[in-house]
Amino acid sequence: MLKKQIVNSYLALVSIHGMITIGFALVFGVNHPFFSHYEINNVIGVIIASIATAIPLYAIAGFLFVIGKENKKQLLRASIHAASIFTATLTVLWAISYLLSTNGFSQSTWLIYVLSNYPSAVIMNRIINLPDLRSPLMLLTATSPGIGFVFGVFIRIFNENTSKAGK
């Protein structure tokens, strides 16, 4: 039963990611709303802004994901597993993009990661300093979809448990 919930949670997270990517792309295009915080040789502000933009989007999605579920017994554990798999997938795509860009391939290889993690990584489109673009700190943007989704699932399950206890 847990394996089925993990697969369903993962498929829901991938679907939600696709919808958020399309919506974010339609609203903001190739620009990130917080790109003005970018300073050369200081990417932490951009990363925090990027993560702060993505986590609420995925938290809302995780919150809404729980509504349609009848069996919520192991749903939080299943969503943690699914988010871990999704984060690992984004990490592998980041590593592939990193290796291809540092080994002499075109800089457009970053597009692989940007398109696969659009709401968080679109900020990388406008970074002009190569050491900033290749900063290992950029890997932190791969964690925001999973963290947001699990946070939303947790809030909804906690909210339902406290409302049932109050009755």
Image: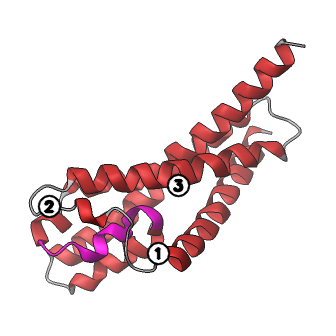
Seen in the image, is 77 located left or right of residue 141? right
Above or below 94: residue 151? above
Seen in the image, is 47 located left or right of residue 91? left
Question: Which disc is residue 42 wearing?
Answer: none
Mark 2 residue type: Glu
Image quadrant where one finds the N terminus: top right
Question: Mark 3 against mark 2, which lies toward the viewer?
Answer: 2
Q: Mark 2 or mark 1, which has the lower sequence index?
A: 1
Q: Which residue is mark 2?
A: 39
- Place of residue 11 in the rendered image (x, y in percent of width and height, measured from the top left): 69, 59
Which residue occupies 24% across, 51% down?
A: 45
Instruction: Bin the neighbour count of mark 2 within 10 Å (Cα to Cα): few under 14, some 14-19, many 20 and up.
Output: some
Q: Nearer the viewer, residue 5 or 29?
A: 29
Q: Nearer the viewer, residue 137 or 126?
A: 126
Image quadrant where one finds the C terminus: top right
Q: Mark 3 or mark 1, which has the lower sequence index?
A: 1
Above or below 71: residue 7? below
Q: Which residues lie in the magenta part?
A: 119-129
Seen in the image, is 158 located left or right of residue 30? right
Distance from Cα at disc 3 to Cα at disc 2: 30 Å
Instruction: Bin the neighbour count of mark 3 within 10 Å (Cα to Cα): few under 14, some 14-19, many 20 and up.
Output: many
The local secondary structure at tag 3 comes to: helix
Which residue occupies 65% across, 61% down?
A: 16
Distance from Cα at disc 2 to Cα at disc 1: 21 Å
Q: Which residue is mark 3?
A: 86
Magenta region, mostly helix, strand or loop?
Answer: helix
Q: Is residue 125 magenta?
A: yes
- Place of residue 103 in the rendered image (x, y in percent of width and height, measured from the top left): 15, 77
Instruction: Bin the neighbour count of mark 1 within 10 Å (Cα to Cα): few under 14, some 14-19, many 20 and up.
Output: few
